[in-house]
Image (spheres, rainbow, N blue to C red):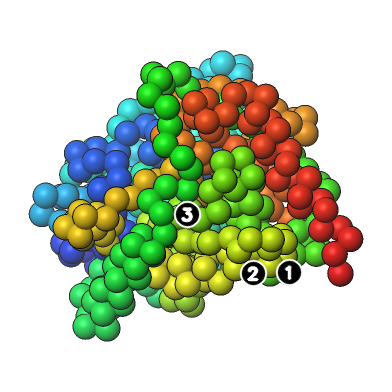
Amino acid sequence: MTLAIPFSGPRAGAWPQTVGQRNVLDWVGKDSLGAADVLTLRIWTRAGLPALSHALSATLTRHESLRSTHLPEQGTQQVAGRGELRAALVEAVTQEELALATAQDRPFGLADEYPVRVTILTRRNRPYLLVLHLSHIAADWAAAVLLRRELAGALAGERAAPPPAVQPVDLAVAEQSPRARRQLDAAIDHWVTVLGRHPARALPPRDDSPYRGHHHVILRSPGAGDVLARRAPCAPSSVLLAALARAIDRRYGSAEGVMHVLCANRQQPETAHYIGTISQETLVGYRLPPGACLTQTSRILHGSALRAYRRGRYDHERLKRTIAELGIVRHRDVVINNISGYPGAGPGPGPRLETSTGPEDTPLTLTVYELAPRLVCKLSVDERYLDGAQAREFLAEIEEELLSMRGVS
């Protein structure tokens, strides 16, 4: 069974894609967005079908990114002014039925499908869970959090806010201005400088043995989070970057490199409530002075991170082309994904250190689910760099160094 969700927006037509949308296509491919590249929102609810239909209809009407299709080869986004989205109604009583009903195993079609799928789970024909699968071309993590908050508020009876001042169409038009073009040019120049100034690798080259998998270690540390909240000499995220850089230096003797750090790109008022894809990886170059303590290192990484965040919006395909022409090598070997501002993204309760194995794209990734007042993060590392015990030890050393700041005034 399905439920029709009608929408009616104030404008329709074709416009150029934003830089962020083109970056997503460069990242995941231009034909479809696979299941692994989809965000999932779950909202538990006691609302009936009329209230759910009304809230979803208002959300689709308000946000053009959710009712747009894309023609990647033409570089255009097509906004639908009027139409409807069909939400699936699924009776799911057991945990197995719930898991099966909410699984995302089908790629999004870009040209002929809206970038959101809605499933309403029912028990004895009464809704209890609203699930949204969002394509990255429509929303990043920050946008997903905003949508979750908006939908939860609508279902609680809150008055809907007016449409956001900046939609993807508006951003695409603004990006064509001379001022925006200069900013995008400056960003490319900045990243070329960073990549040319620092070693291509933060980690040493891997051995030539076949890839077997990654070790994943989750750390849950209220103590480290409390230190970051109370004792951090700068932004807690910068202190964590510094602790990671120092751990890499202790393990591998690499005191210099480039970290690839996720930036939400929502520092400006016009993008603070933007529903679309605008987050991007920035390049934080660093050089650790001999003998520097964690506080000193944190301030160095903080300055480098601020410079990176100011250049957080750039054309990724153009950057790849530019550094290739200049003969600059880029190794994406250390990645930090800080999604601590996005509730519901974490691994849930568990022991202080929890280990598992599985595939991962990059040699070393640190995913931050919570930062302060509790630190929850996951280290994913290629086993050709660290075995399971070493991975646990590596993350525990980062925790220990953060805890050592308790006595710093």
Name the residue beneath numbered marker 2.
299
- For marks 2 and 1, give the CA distance: 7 Å
Q: Is residue 388 above or below residue 168?
A: above
Residue drawn at (37%, 32%) of the image: 35
How many numbered markers are drawn? 3
For mark 1, give the secondary structure. loop
Q: Position of residue 308 (x, y in %)?
A: 45, 67
**Mark 3: amino acid:** Gly
**Residue type highlighted by circle 2:** Arg
The residue wearing badge 1 is 233
Q: Position of residue 80 (x, y in %)?
A: 23, 56
Tell me if label 2 and label 1 are in contact, CB under 8 Å: yes
Pointer 3 or 1: first along the chain? 1
Amino acid type at circle 1 is Pro
Residue 377 position, x and y percent, is: 65, 42
Q: Furthest-front residue in view?
A: 290
Residue at 26% over, 80% down: 182
**Whole-percent x, y for residue 158 in the image:** 61, 62
How would you rate the neighbour count of disc 3 (Cα within 10 Å): few for under 14, some for 14-19, many for 20 or more? many
Q: Quadrant of the N terminus?
A: top left
Judged from this view, the residue extending furthest toward the bottom is 179
Mark drawn on residue 47:
none
Instruction: Give the alpha-carbon distance from disc 3 to disc 1, as whole Å.
Output: 22 Å
- Where disc 2 sits, the SS reads helix
Residue at screen point 67% across, 24% down? 389
Identify the residue position indicated by label 3 in the image: 257
Q: Is residue 199 visible?
A: yes
Q: Is residue 41 above or below residue 279?
A: above
Nearer to me, 182 or 3: 182
Q: Quadrant of the C terminus?
A: bottom right
| Badge 2 or badge 1: first in the primary sequence | 1
